[in-house]
Image (tube, grey):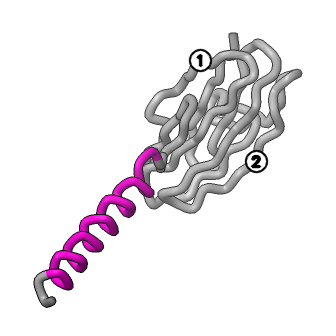
């Protein structure tokens, strides 16, 4: 009697483990498209090239605030501007977070900057 109960409990434990393992299979924890990373006071890559219709995920890899908006740093000064066809963007990152920028539905070159960190620019080239 106890052998049958013990075998039943063991089989139930194995079945539970298999079902739990299958339920987490295939989950994704990261962005699926193009990404641009930010460090303490700069973009780890100053330019990214994407295809028309795509969005990018901007990832703040550090616990530092960044405010990203349309425009560029030029000669040490902020030049706020939005190119024709660029998505309007103004997002505050609080540290170790991310946000989607786009979609970019027009081909061209688009400029974004961090208003907190002088010289921190991101260029998005859309083909």
Number of other residues with Cα within 10 Å of mark 2, as a class: few under 14, some 14 to 19, many 20 or more: some
The answer to which quarter of the image holds residue 71 is: top right
Residue 50 coordinates in the image, percent (x, y): 62, 19
In the image, residue 111 lies in the stretch drawn in magenta: no
Residue 69 coordinates in the image, percent (x, y): 73, 42
User: Which residue is disc 2 drawn over?
Assistant: 90
The answer to which quarter of the image holds residue 44 is: top left
Residue 68 coordinates in the image, percent (x, y): 67, 45
* The label number, if any, that marks residue 64 in the structure image: none
Q: Which residues are magenta?
A: 4-26
Q: Is residue 33 left or right of residue 87?
A: left
Q: Is residue 10 above or below residue 26?
A: below
Comparing 69 with 33, the one in front is 33
Could you tell me which quadrant the C terminus lies in? top right
Number of marks in the image? 2
Secondary structure category for the residue under label 2: strand
Q: Residue at x 63, y 48 (%)?
A: 99
Q: Is residue 96 left or right of residue 76?
A: left
Q: In this view, which residue lies farthest toward the bottom?
A: 2
The answer to which quarter of the image holds residue 39 is: top left
* The label number, if any, that marks residue 49 in the structure image: 1
Q: Is residue 83 above or below residue 28?
A: above
Disc nearer the start of the sequence (2/1): 1
Q: CA distance from mark 2 to mark 1?
A: 20 Å
């Amino acid at each position: 009697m106890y052998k049958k109960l013990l075998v039943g409990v063991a089989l139930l434990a194995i079945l539970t483990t298999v079902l739990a393992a299958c339920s987490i299979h295939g989950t994704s924890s990261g962005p699926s498209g193009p990404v641009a990373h930010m460090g303490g006071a700069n973009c780890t890559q100053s330019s990214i090239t994407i295809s028309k219709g795509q969005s990018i995920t901007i990832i703040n890899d550090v616990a530092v605030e960044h405010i990203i908006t349309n425009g560029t740093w030029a000669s040490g000064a902020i030049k706020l501007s939005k190119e024709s066809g660029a998505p309007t963007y103004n997002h505050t990152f609080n540290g170790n977070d991310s946000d989607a920028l786009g979609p970019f539905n027009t081909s061209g070159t688009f400029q974004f900057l961090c208003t907190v960190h002088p010289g921190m620019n991101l260029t998005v080239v859309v083909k």
